[in-house]
Image (cartoon, grey):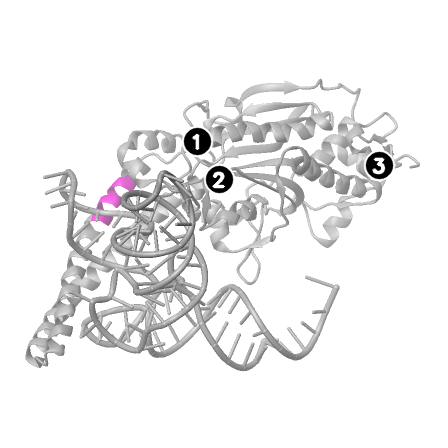
Amino acid sequence: MHDIRALRETPELYEKAWAAKGRSGAAAQALDLDGKVRAAKLAAETTQSKRNDLSKRVGLAKAQKDEALASQLMANVEALKSDLVAQGEAERGFSLDLQDLLASLPNIPAADVPQGADEHGNVEVRRWGEPNHVASPKDHVELGEGLGMLDFEAAARMSGARFTVIKGQLARLERALGQFMLDLQTQQNGYLEVSPPLLVNDAAAYGTDKLPKFADDLFKTTDGRWLIPTAEVPLTSLVMGQIVAEEELPLRVTALTPCFRSEAGASGRDTRGMIRQHQFYKVELVSITTPDQSDAEHERMVSCAESVLKALELPFRTMLLCTGDMGFGARRTYDLEVWIPSQGQYREISSCSNCGDFQARRMDARTKKAGEKGTRFVHTLNGSGLAVGRTLVAIMENYQDESGRIAIPQALHRYLPGLTHIGGEG
RNA sequence: GGAGAGGUGGCUGAGUGGUCGAAAGCACCGCACUCGAAAUGCGGCGUACCUGGAAGGGUACCGUGGGUUCGAAUCCCACCCUCUCCGCCA
């Protein structure tokens, strides 16, 4: 949600950002509604004030047994009724319109985010590792099916497109990957492990800016809850409606959860394989910070995500997203892209965003310094550390050999005792 | 799923139609006392929004949303949540 006062002060800033996202005129529209809300509010409150005053005098008159004065005053209040109702409705109406409008408008990018229309405007920040150009690399589908450990047909029969059945040593590798990532983030990077609900209510989805705009991307249960598209939703919602003591910040939490996405707008993209699925595991990182900490925390979070790829010795690059490629709630986003040999390109495997106070305003999450009056909205950050399914793909493709076997990265050996290769005897 | 009890300020908890934004206690802040601290005494202490140059004024908020009434924390309806007991259950 947006700070209406900031919008009043620097509408041109908002207009520029929203125009770039195809919402030109939105700032003026919001200011116009804001003016109407305030005028209606003033009128309503003035009438309410009169009503309250008269009603109070009714009580006094009755206490003094002056029934004539009492009924006179009651008649006076009665005369205000129609105004009261009309003004109240006007205020609520404008207020809801303004809220709906603001809830549909994306966050404002930080000043240092590069301008750009789409992913071509993203800026490479750094690169790690050397892509090993295997001669005619197989893709993970061919590898997995060749090993008899990926079964897309069985998944399609029971669930439909965009699901996978993983079997045997490959299923075990997926499980090991999740454990490894979670252990790395909790034991080395200081995140607190959390096992959150996978079904959430409207408020949690709204607070993390998945509603109302992206309802189509979510799965909804018959009793009106939502399957989480990412653990960002429950993890960030830990502070929903809370006032957190400043000493407790930054709050760093992580979770390994399944993620459910309807991928409504993605038909035709990445239809082959398990790059884009309705369901996948992901280790999510969430930090709740004070406003002044969030930029430093963002850099730290990116390096926490990078540490996973480094440990697995997977070549990647770190991208600073441009204005046009950023998500709805972010004010700055870094993507990590891992090398996928079969495609000869880097593909997104992690996305780390600083949302500033955008989500905090929506969910009313604040912080208070001991001994000081007043509260501030917290800043919220989230990042993948990492997407397990895509990491599995990256390992399969980067660690394949000519015979179609897959070596196990060194860092995972302690999670897979006795197993050195997928498709080997072990 | 069934029966019952309950949701009031940071916490505990009073308040069942009219100066109630709400007693009291705890916590917290300031002052006094003290060499200092504790104890004690006095005072202060909710949030959001609107309005005003300021002082100030106003409105709303007692789980949420409706309703009744001149007037609602208080009465009515629906929903949500918590607790206790029973049932079921990984």
In the figure, is residue A331 to the left or right of A263? left
Where is B21 relative to A172, above or below?
A: below
Sequence-first tag of 3 and 2: 3
Q: Does A323 appear in magenta?
A: no
Where is A335 relative to A369, above or below?
A: above
**Residue A62 visible in rendering:** yes
In the figure, is residue A420 to the left or right of A140? right
Q: Mark 3 points at which residue?
A: A146
Spatial CA distance of label 1 from label 3 is: 52 Å
Q: In the figure, residue A409 lies in which quadrant?
A: top right
Image depth: mark 1 or mark 3 in front:
1
In the figure, is residue A180 to the left or right of A65? right
Q: Residue A379 carries which label?
A: none
Spatial CA distance of label 3 from label 2 is: 54 Å
Q: Name the residue under label 1.
A: A292
Q: Residues within 10 Å of mark 1 (few under 14, many from 20)?
A: few
Q: Name the residue under label 2.
A: A247
Number of marks drawn? 3
| Callouts 1 and 3 in the same chain | yes
Q: Residues within 10 Å of mark 2 (few under 14, many from 20)?
A: few
Q: What stretch is highlighted in magenta?
A: A29-38
Label 3: element kind: helix
Spatial CA distance of label 1 from label 2 is: 14 Å
> Which amino acid type is marked by label 3?
Gly
Determine contact: label 1, label 3, CB under 8 Å: no
| Callouts 1 and 2 in the same chain | yes
Sequence-first tag of 1 and 2: 2
Looking at the image, which residue is at 43% across and 31% down? Answer: A292
Q: Residue A276 location, x and y as percent?
A: 65, 39
Looking at the image, which residue is at 83% across and 31% down? Answer: A406
Subunit bearing disc 1:
A
Image depth: mark 1 or mark 2 in front:
2
